Image (cartoon, rainbow, N blue to C red):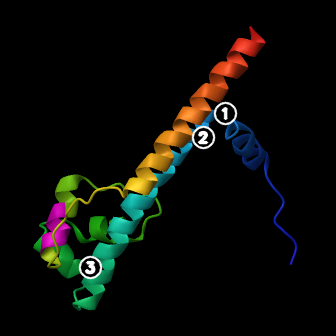
Amino acid sequence: MAAAQKTGFDRFVAEQLRRPRFADEYARARAEIRAVDDLIRALDEQRVAIGMTKAELARRISGRPEVVRRLLTAEDANPTMETVLRMAEAVGLRVALEPIDAPSRLRHTRDRRRKTARSKRQAHAAA
């Protein structure tokens, strides 16, 4: 099967990703989106596992059914923390924070330092 042809936007993003600052911000934004998606998916999986309908979930959090449906199915869901907490409680879960594993945190710091140093060298060379 042939690979999909890249659009102008795809080429633009690929070019921008070569810039360290853009790449860092892009990675951060993707991580945030992935975290929200994972959270919403976990809440929806728990809802299904306990046999709760979306309408029942809406009633339990004092929300409108169409809002809950959209939140659980939209590609760009961005719930408030209050909504997440209410939904979690309604399906028998609680939200907890956990530390980032040390290797991941160290790798991110090391990569950022390398990119910053590279950017400074490039700026100095261009001057």
Q: Which residues are magenta?
A: 85-89
* Distance between mark 1 and mark 2 Cα atoms: 6 Å
Amino acid carrying mark 1 in the image: Arg
Give residue 99's position: percent from left, percent from top: 28, 56
Give residue 14's position: percent from left, percent from top: 73, 45
Q: Residue under circle 2? A: 23
The residue lying toward the viewer, choosing from 27 and 70, is 27
Q: Residue under circle 3? A: 54
Give residue 33's position: percent from left, percent from top: 44, 55
Q: Marks 1 and 2: CB-CB under 8 Å? A: yes
Q: Which of label 2 and label 3 is nearer to you?
A: 2
Amino acid carrying mark 2 in the image: Ala
Q: Residue under circle 1? A: 19
Q: Quadrant of the C terminus?
A: top right
Number of residue marks: 3
* Distance between mark 3 and mark 1 Cα atoms: 43 Å
88 is within the stretch colored magenta: yes
Name the secondary structure under disc 3. Answer: helix
Q: Residue at x 69, y 43 (%)?
A: 13
104 is within the stretch colored magenta: no
Q: Residue at x 11, y 74 (%)?
A: 60
Amino acid carrying mark 3 in the image: Lys
Name the secondary structure under disc 1. Answer: loop
